[in-house]
Amino acid sequence: EKAGLNLFLGSYPITPATDIMHELVLRKDLGVKVVQAEDEIAGVSAAIGASFAGYLAATSTSGPGLALKSEAIGLAVMAELPLVVVDVMRGGPSTGLPTKTEQTDLLQALYGRNGESPAVVMAASTPDDCFQQAFMAGKIALEFMTPVILLSDAFIGNGTSLWKLPKLAELPEIKPNYVKSDMEGFNVASRDEKTKVRYWSIPGTEGFGHRNGGLEKDYATGAISTDALNHQLMVDTREQKVNNVSKILPELKVEGNKDAELLVIGWGGTYGHLISAVNSINKNGKKIALAHFNYLNPLPKNTIEVIQKYKKVVVCELNSGQFANLLRSKVAAVEFLQYNKVQGQPFTVAELEECFNELLTTPQSNIK
């Protein structure tokens, strides 16, 4: 509604993401089109075709399906088309634990494509946060002409929250980067030089016909190119476009006691347990803070500034340390401690409190 576009979902059933298809197929009254394809690859490919044709296009899946969709997502990166990919994470690897929850797809979402293939990666924190994050995923995909991978998990997908539907007028505008009617010399690689966002020409727009495929393009002409320096330029341009998303992201917020020595870091569906543990410890007179991430690539622009204020930092994840390793590559001179759980189960508040109390009273050490 805010973008003036119809929604298209091309997908294939997979636990625990299938409910997205079930809900959207009921929204024909709002112009939603749903295609249940023969497999995950066909689902995402149909969505890319719909995006090329001018739809807000999405595909939904879980971890095994994200792996199958990886080549097609790379096509969307190369073609610079808007696409929302929702991954409701479950236990893996392989078929794994379809009805259990984990946060083990993060590195796959960040890097699980061939070549230098940057995409925006986000995560919802709670069932009632899913609307806001899905809205922002659509906005970013359309305004930056890029795939956006939105991570949820089985804990969120099977959860419920009271939630008030926002008024349409209160939601931010969505302004796709359409080609301008008076533009001269348009080609498939034409872009706004300030933002590096490619202009979107919907097929059928007179005077702006073009072909768009998976081969590298010349930066100036849009023709297929194997020139070495041009490829470097295009790789850098696509990376810069994604990095520029950080300019519109909300800054990272710190909850709890901001004067604390210990900062807890989390992301995605662990929020409820983390904030409950942090609040409980603060009520008992100790000082602890929480920084919870919704935006994972790019990170909020104040991430380094926030983290470097604290003497101790512990990253809590339902995996073996994927976000902790990402932060180590982005934030210098910080020792990131880890608290990890890979049991197909969410954290409990009690175990988190035990971990945090130990960190508050003992020298730095990783707690598994």
Image: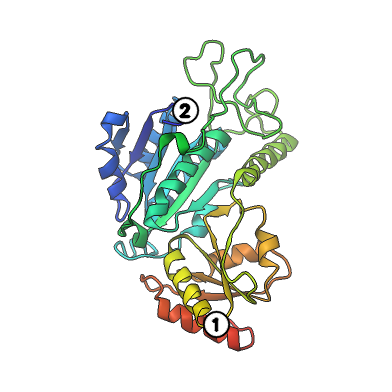
Q: Amino acid at mark 2?
A: Phe
**The image quarter in which residue 248 lies:** top right
Contact, mark 1 vs mark 2 (Cβ under 8 Å): no
Seen in the image, is 353 located left or right of residue 333?
left
Seen in the image, is 130 located left or right of residue 209?
left
Q: Does residue 250 appear anywhere in the picture?
A: yes
Counting from the top left corner in percent of width and height, residue 300 is at 62, 53
Residue 52 disc label: 2
Counting from the top left corner in percent of width and height, residue 85 is at 44, 45
Determine the residue positioned at 59% across, 78% down.
287
| Image position of 208 with respect to 164: above or below | above
Residue 285 disc label: 1
| Image position of 169 with respect to 126: above or below | above
Q: Could you say whether the residue bearing mark 1 is in a helix, strand or loop?
A: loop
Q: Does residue 112 appear anywhere in the picture?
A: no
| Image position of 215 with respect to 96: above or below | above
Q: Could you say whether the residue bearing mark 2 is in a helix, strand or loop?
A: helix
Determine the residue positioned at 40% across, 58% down.
126
